[in-house]
Image: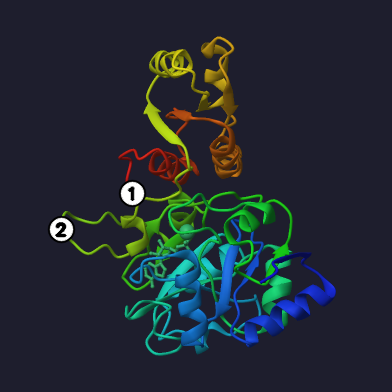
Amino acid sequence: MVTQILKAEGEALKKAAKLIREGEAVAFHTETVYGLGANAFSDEAVLRIYALKGRPADNPLIVHVHRQYDISKLIDGEPPYAMALRKAFLPGPLTMVYPSKGKVSKYVSCGLNTLAIRVPSSPAAQAFLRETDLPVAAPSANLSKHVSPVTAGHVFDDFNGKIPLILDGGACEGGIESTVLDCTGEIPQILREGLVTREMIASVAGACGIYRAKRGEKPKSPGMAYKHYSPRCRTAYCMSAEEAAMLYDQEAAQGGAPCILCESGVVPLLGGRDCLDLGREGEEMAQRLYALLRTAEARVTLLIGIEPKERGGVMAGVLNRFTRAFGGTHET
Ligand code: AMP
Ligand code: MG
């Protein structure tokens, strides 16, 4: 199969919508990361997504709709706080999990009585979803466990020859996946941290919890149980510049090509060693992280990450991805 990369406009949108109606998978730009979409009503199309990614069968998908889509058709009721959150943050990088049974293919939610819905703000995503006018089930457009894609080229690297079309909307400005918020309880509860923070949600809903799976409990958001976002090179995780420099020098002495990924303030402490600069504050680090992990895997033998010290805002989401990419333990 030939994989086309087309700018998300005009005829390309029509072609994408036709492919989705025919049960094919199409990759598309969003403001978080690129998604790999299929018709959420079709069992066959949804199963194709799992097969293409090599995604575990118990890791549910998020359904994407355009801003005019009537989501009451997809859910079994909505608490008042969820309505307020929708008004405040959608379209945008917030996925809301609702009670829902039997509205879309059972493979979307892997048998759970809930459905995760997202209304992306990217104009390219909106144009694609409007043209399609169907709920589109879409995980990130990467092979399972690999780093999420933030350019059309990243999607191509994982799926060349396997999908017919990538709708190119440029680089994703958000850079990490959406916040996933459980809206089935008394108060909203974050299942996966992202660009819409706990503080932002609490300021509208009055309260916001963060879900942490207890030992032995089946996690509410199964995706969070998996190793994730891994670059295809050896990795090491450090807490300080000194520790990173030592590992770097060992690797270099053995003829390897090491590189250090760290926040801007730490770069001057590394004495000219090869570094990838994550940036200074949360939004910037979110935007750069995945692109830098993909750059690193293509050219280094050992990528050494130094845990960023920055906290607050979107850093909870950034740290979650950062530590999981390095096999660290900062699980949320
Ligand atoms: P991805 O699309 O690859 O970013 O992954 C989607 C994330 O949303 C995973 O962490 C899933 O576990 C989570 N998710 C999707 N649907 C649901 C649901 N119905 N309930 C809880 N979590 C969900
Ligand atoms: Mg993913």
- Label 2 or label 1, whichever comes before in sequence order: 2
Q: CA distance from mark 2 to mark 1?
A: 15 Å
Q: Which quadrant of the view contains residue 125?
A: bottom right
301 lies above or below 149? above
Q: Which quadrant of the view contains residue 287?
A: top right
Residue furthest out toward the top? 271
Camera-nearest residue between 231 and 291: 231
Check disc 2 and give the amino acid type: Gly
In the image, which disc is placed on residue 146? none
Left or right position of 54 against 90: left
Label 2 sits on residue: 216
Badge 2 residue CB within 8 Å of ligand 1: no
Label 1 sits on residue: 332
65 lies above or below 276? below
Left or right position of 244 against 166: left
Badge 1 residue CB within 8 Å of ligand 1: no
SS at badge 2: loop
SS at badge 1: loop
